[in-house]
Image: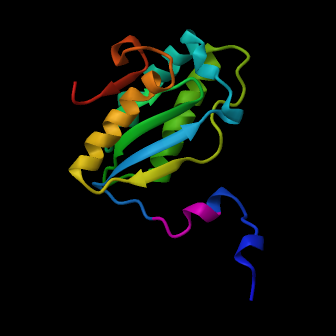
Amino acid sequence: MKNACSARSTGYADLRKGRVSEAGRIYLVTFTTRGRHRLFEDPDCARIAARAMVDPRLWRDSRLLAWVLMPDHWHGLIDLGAKDTLPGRVQKLKSNTARQVRNGCPGTAAVWAKGFHDKALRAEQALLESARYIICNPVRAGLVRRVGDYPYWNAVWL
């Protein structure tokens, strides 16, 4: 019998096998910058990325309910629409922001690391807890003392 600890993963694609995107489901999504580089400490790069993330052309079917752009990662709540898959929606979000950041921040090469982490939310309570977690991220990280002092986040409930 094969030892489970010795089995080699072929990478990120293996983690997604068997996963299904469900329209109408809300997902907590996280992805990081390439090499966890703190690219978005630069206010110009952060502003460009934040504008690109809320571009209405990205959100025709799905909805971005809450999000925060941290110096080296992004968290968001995505309400997945019927015409989207979660990997497809995340890929479009990452490629759009990366293109805009590379155009506006000279010398920037790769922006995002491959892959993303997601968690399907199952209850209204989980939605509120996840939104609070996202929005309070800059406070927990010590970037600001109050949520309102951090400029790179938003939520539909405001």
Quadrant where the N terminus sits is: bottom right
Q: Is residue 15 above or below residue 151?
A: below
Count the numbered circles shown.
0
Foreground pick, 7 / 44: 7
Foreground pick, 134 / 14: 134
Place residue 78 in its image quadrant. Answer: top left
- Picture coordinates of residue 8, whole percent (x, y): 76, 68
Q: Is residue 53 left or right of residue 158?
A: right
Residue that appears at 69% across and 13% down: 106
Foreground pick, 113 / 149: 149
Q: Is residue 64 above or below residue 54?
A: below
Using the rendered image of the protein, determine whether residue 97 is visible from the camera's viewpoint: yes
- Picture coordinates of residue 82, whole percent (x, y): 31, 55
Q: Is residue 139 left or right of residue 13?
A: left
Place residue 29 in its image quadrant. Answer: top left
Residue that appears at 41% across and 14% down: 145
Asked which colour scheme the image uses, the reply is: rainbow
Residue that appears at 56% across and 10% down: 44
Q: Is residue 112 magenta?
A: no
Residue that appears at 34% across and 25% down: 154
- Picture coordinates of residue 40, whole percent (x, y): 58, 20
Q: Is residue 14 left or right of residue 152?
A: right
Q: Is residue 158 above or below residue 134?
A: above
Place residue 17 in its image quadrant. Answer: bottom right
Magenta stretch bounds: 14-19
- Picture coordinates of residue 95, whole percent (x, y): 56, 36
Quadrant where the C terminus sits is: top left
Q: Is residue 157 left or right of residue 1?
A: left
Q: Is residue 17 magenta?
A: yes
Using the rendered image of the protein, determine whether residue 64 is visible from the camera's viewpoint: no
